[in-house]
Image (cartoon, grey):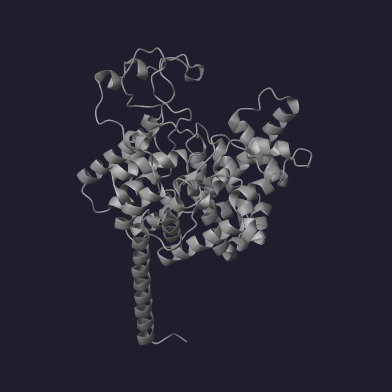
Amino acid sequence: MAKPKGRRQQITRSSIHKAKEHEVETIRLINAALDQQPVDLSALRKLASVRGLVNNQLRSKCWPLLLPASPSVRSSASPPASAPASCTDPSSPIHSSSADPSTGSSSSNLDGTASPGSGSDCTPTTHRDSHVVDCDVVRSLWSYTEGWAEEERALKREELKRMLNGVVLAHADSPSPVYYYQGLHDVASVLLMVVGERDASPLLAVLASVHLRDCTRPSIDAVLELLGMLFPILAAVDPQLAQHLQDADLMPYFALSWFITWFSHGQRLLQDAARLFDLFLSSHPLMPLYVGAAAMHNARAQLLRLREMPELHTFLVNLDLGQGPALDQLARQAISLIKLSPPLPLAQRHLHHLSLASAVAPAAALSDVAGAWGVPEHPPWEKLRRKERGGGGGVGGGPLGLVWRVLLLRSRGREGGKGGLLASTALSLTGIVGVYLVAAVVMTYGSGRSGQQGLFEAGGRSLWPGLGLFLQL
């Protein structure tokens, strides 16, 4: 029996009143943390993750505190507005690309910086993926600038372009350079729209070297390694569902967009994307995978009804996280899950079943001194494996695990010269991977998303060729 209309209205008014009270209390608690000398970062981090930062005015104050940038990063995050002619002239030495980039014989490095002895002392304004940035910027900010005049949107896109090029160029001389990837523009767009270019640029520079460090490498290897942790994370809260997905030979490619864009590619409302960023900026770099696992657990009834790999993939690519209060609840679930099964112990327990080699995010730690997250410069996995040598191991996960490892080997280009057995195995299993890709693409096109622009549809060269079409992000 349906509730009377007056009763429904009373419940609605009561819910709105409680939500308003919760918001007012959250603002009071945040301001109390900000008023402490020094700022109570521990309390601020907890409030941002569990309750959210409520509005963009508070985010402008809190996000730079949650992700502090050094003075040098803050000053160098944005490229200069203008440069000497020799820097912008395509015929100048630092733009020369006549030589094979893999040989290093060109007068410029892959990141666009001048090579030693090139004779150029100007600051570079381009890098190897500048044209990809151009393509991605052109199709950015549509949902966040709905109703804007085209001139206003164009100005905001120029700011976005400066941010993306600036984060690459700011790390150009670093021993660990940062490379642009398609999806970074989604993260940068949320930062830009919430806190503005001045504060968003250093935030992005820090993210590129910490939370998103495994994304800003020259290849996709480290990200593929991290995606392999999703099912073990899910199994910690829902082993039945995790087994169901693995029995269907489902690979975690559906989660690529979740991780590399912090779910922002699928969020039409800026407020919802910003709420997720409150959580991610306050948390371990792998928190997006925990959010994804919590969302999968919430959708377990629908997922358990699906049996075929392509339909499971399609459902998860289009997984709806909800809005407003639903995101608050999802954040609390993810926080509980990461406490139940922290990243590094989880990775260590499954070390022989995962292909962790170059990824550093699972080993991230919160600094007691700086109050900020950091990742190690070098991955610890080989050292850990040496300690555990003799305790068994090998390829885990059955046939799916073997396909996963072969894909990683092929992406690293290590299959050549390894002998006939590995070469023939790679050749045969590539067919299995191909079937997976084709089936998923067919199902994705049939899901009604064919009219939506994908993350990898730009006209420029992608750093991760071939995956964009398949993933239909």
Is residue 164 visible to us here? Answer: no
Asked if 73 appears above or below 303 in the picture, the reply is above
Residue 108, how many percent across, how many down?
Answer: 41, 18
Residue 211, how many percent across, how many down?
Answer: 48, 44
Which of the 4 image quarters holds residue 171?
top left
Asked if 451 appears above or below 429 in the picture, the reply is below
Asked if 99 appears above or below 301 in the picture, the reply is above
Q: Residue at x 68, y 44 (%)?
A: 351
- In the rendered image, the residue lying farthest to the front is 37
| 2 horizontally vs 402: left or right | left
How many discs mark residues in the rendered view?
0
Q: Nearer the viewer, residue 442 or 229?
A: 229
Q: Residue at x 25, y 31 (%)?
A: 81
Q: Nearer the viewer, residue 192 or 265?
A: 192
Q: Nearer the viewer, residue 367 or 304?
A: 367
Is residue 180 visible to us here? Answer: yes
Residue 16, how many percent across, how many down?
Answer: 35, 75
| 175 horizontally vs 310: left or right | left
Residue 370, how many percent across, how many down?
Answer: 45, 45
| 338 horizontally vs 88: left or right | right
